[in-house]
Amino acid sequence: MGKGGIDMSKNKRGKALWRMPSRGRGTCPLCGSTRIKLLYFAKGSQGEKLSVCKKCQGKQAG
Ligand SMILES: [Zn+2]
């Protein structure tokens, strides 16, 4: 590395996604698909934001 440079490989990535243990994958709370990318949002029964799969994006739970 050059002087004053930052070794990016040793820094955590900016994307919050990559800090998650599953790297954005998990079980979709709406359709129950496992090991799927939960990169979309739907509304929970209380109006809360849920991370869901592509199929379920924009859906309303409950
Ligand atoms: Zn889903």
Image (cartoon, rainbow, N blue to C red):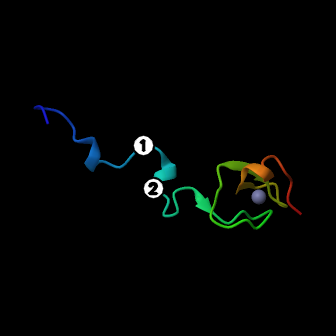
Q: Is mark 2 within 8 Å of ligand 1?
A: no
Q: Which quarter of the figure is the N terminus placed in?
A: top left
For this view, does 39 lie left or right of residue 2? right
In the rendered picture of this protein, how many numbered marks are placed on residues? 2
For this view, does 15 lie left or right of residue 31? left
* Secondary structure of the residue carrying numbered label 1: loop
Judged from this view, the residue extending furthest toward the left is 3
* Image coords of residue 58 (percent x, y): 81, 46
Q: Which residue is mark 2?
A: 19
Judged from this view, the residue extending furthest toward the right is 62
Q: Which residue is mark 1?
A: 14
Toward which corner of the image does residue 25 lie, by quadrant?
bottom right
Toward which corner of the image does residue 45 lie, by quadrant?
bottom right
Quadrant of the image where one finds ligand 1: bottom right
* Image coords of residue 40 (percent x, y): 70, 48
* Secondary structure of the residue carrying numbered label 2: helix
Q: Residue at 22% x, 41% y: name it.
A: 7
Crowd class of label 2 (few under 14; some 14 to 19; many from 20; radius 10 Å): few
- The residue under label 1 is which amino acid type? Gly
Of the numbered discs 1 and 2, the one sitting upstream in the chain is: 1
Q: Residue at 84% x, 51% y: name it.
A: 59
- The residue under label 2 is which amino acid type? Arg
Q: Residue at 76% x, 67% y: name it.
A: 32
